[in-house]
Image (cartoon, rainbow, N blue to C red):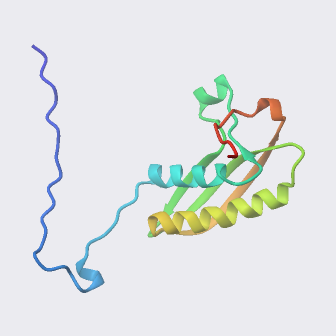
Amino acid sequence: MVESPARQTAVLETDPEPADQAEDRGTLEVRNKALQRIVELAALRLPGTVAQSSKLGRITGMALPKADITAEGRAVRVKLDVAMIWPGNVTRIATAARDTVREEAFRLSGIEVRSVDVTVHAVDPTAADDTGRRVE
């Protein structure tokens, strides 16, 4: 007989009265992996960016977009690699990615992004993955 590991369950205790002061409300902890996903999805939603990977890229972790997050206290630094269809405006994509990542990361997680280093990879339209995005 194989025993399955016990599952841990979080129990929330609630006060009958809501906390009025911010310091009494608790904290939000966002893991780097969650923030990485937020950043990558924000970059992928930008007009002109595409998902790009190969079989080797999926194994080595080089599918695009790819974000590396470095935590620095309550703030982070982001290194972001994105793919765009060539020909395209690299400067526009890099600027939009930087600004969007900062805004979305803060909006969804409350974490300040101190810097975003963006590398834009130009890809042939036939090399881009079908992301399933469609205009309706």
Q: Residue furthest bottom?
A: 21
Image height of 136 relative to 24, above or below: above
Query: 16 or 37: nearer the eye?
Result: 16
- Percent across and percent down for residue 28 are 34, 66
Hey, which quadrant is residue 125 in on the image?
A: top right
Image height of 75 relative to 78, above or below: below
Residue at the image position 76 percent from the left and 64 percent from the top: 95
- Percent across and percent down for residue 33 are 46, 49
Number of numbered markers: 0
Residue at the image position 35 percent from the left and 62 percent from the top: 29
Query: 75 or 109: nearer the eye?
Result: 109
Hey, which quadrant is residue 101 in on the image?
A: bottom right
Q: Residue furthest right?
A: 87
Residue at the image position 58 percent from the left and 50 percent from the top: 41
Image height of 21 relative to 73, above or below: below
Q: Is residue 25 left or right of residue 77?
A: left
Image height of 26 relative to 69, above or below: below
- Percent across and percent down for residue 67 are 60, 49
Q: Is residue 127 left or right of residue 2?
A: right
Residue at the image position 30 percent from the left and 82 percent from the top: 22
- Percent across and percent down for residue 136 are 68, 46
Q: Is residue 16 left or right of residue 105?
A: left
Q: Residue furthest front?
A: 136
Question: Which quadrant is the N terminus positioned in?
Answer: top left
